Image (spheres, grey):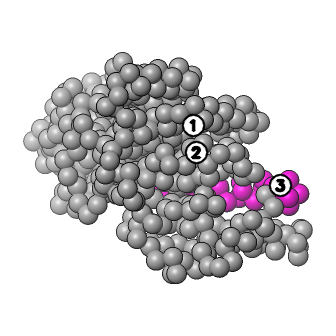
Amino acid sequence: MIVTFYSYKGGVGRTQLVANLASYLALYKNRKILLLDWDLEAPGLDTFFNINRKKIKAGLIELLYDYIKLIKNNEEAEIKDLPFFKEEHFIKKGNIHLIAAGNYNENYKDKINDFKWDEFYNYKSGNYYIEFLKKELNKLDYDYVFIDSRTGVTDYSGICNIQMPEVNVLVVAPSKQNLTGAKAMADDIKNSPYTKDKFRQPIVMPILSRLDLTTNEQANKWYKLFSDGFSKEIEFLIHEIQKYVEIPDSFGRYRDNTMLQYVNELAYGEEILFKSKQKEINSLSIEYKFAVIGEFIEILKLKKSYTYSSVYKLTNSGYFKNKSINLINLTGRQKKELRDAMISAFPTYAELAMVVDYGLDIRLNQISTSLNLSITAYEIIQWAIAHRKLGKLIKEMYNENPENPLIRDFYKQIDKNINQYGEKTINIENINGNKNININ
């Protein structure tokens, strides 16, 4: 999933948010993230990760010039000829990889100033090339591509804020310019022909940033201005999120729990708060706010791909309440193990029909008409996954045959961690001695 981060003005903590969200998701969720620095005039993502700029060989601007060169020489170029990022573009830091804005040598400034965005987009088929880049980026082996966008209104702001992403994070500092500028971008996203023609949804996450909570009157004023200004965007966002989780007092909770308060330590330099190992996150800390924003993005990732296994829940936060516990996805190997366990515990068609009737509240012949037990068991599992009832199925199999060791192993893994709402968590590990079996 591609997420673009935008702010109308600089100095609001946008790049800091990008870097910390990537670090949180990589460390706490084991996600693999690609960062793309599209802030061509003021790039800075690399500084958060202590990357020596002299080692950056190429970046986004070099790729765009490669495309212009190709089109000038061959206007009938085929898709297979289009340039894409190569190994030299990627700077790797564990689960976080970075593509810089460019090679920051003495020619970088000239490259940026000389690039003609209007000509690229409107006369060199740049709009089609951007669509190609978006498609190819989504094919890469990353859970997320985070784009750090340029501030203000530029020739290419519509490219990386409207055409490229599936989700926009708008970082808004408490000033009239920031509020008005970010709101204008939200309106551009919603009213763009690209959005109206259903190439994407207008999913926008407004984030109130750098709010000084020591001044109650001003803080309350900007709370209200932010809430009123982005009410439609937040309501639409919550509508999408509540397909997966329930958020009591949703509007206020979203605003309060994603608001990035002013923190002295973060005002100086480039600081990443999530480093070499996990730690308990204090709900009053700025780390908690980063984590909640990360959890929202995880849920929006669910929206894009139903192969994910559950809604995500911040440990011990009480912030999210699971709406469904059965969005479980299994690997091919796990499906085979569960199929074999099912046949071992219920070796006749009649016994399988009873389990399906009791556990899934549906007749077996509505799921499968095969007389082959192996195929029938497989189709039951597929149906349960598709209808988010795999947890119920496993529980019913255990209730009917608790002595079967294979069924018991599956059940123990989903039963050993029951959250405060009585719902199952979603990690299944070490079933039948296999390690690192994960349905996240």
Q: Nearer the viewer, residue 195 or 44?
A: 44
Question: Does residue 114 appear in the picture of this structure?
Answer: yes
Whichever of labels 1 and 3 marks the residue nearer the N terminus, that label is: 3
Q: Amino acid at mark 2?
A: Lys
Q: In what element is the residue under mark 1?
A: helix
User: Decide: marks 1, 2 in contact (CB < 8 A)?
Assistant: yes
The residues colored magenta run: 119-143
Which image quarter: residue 60? bottom right
Give the labeled residue for mark 1: 178
What's the magenta bit mostly, secondary-structure-wise? helix
Q: Which mark is residue 354?
A: none
Question: Between tags 1 and 3, which lies in front?
Answer: 1
List x then y, in percent, for residue 211.
Answer: 40, 35
Q: In what element is the residue under mark 3?
A: helix
Give the labeled residue for mark 3: 118
Marks 2 and 3, how far apart in space?
Answer: 23 Å
List x then y, in percent, for residue 249.
Answer: 36, 18
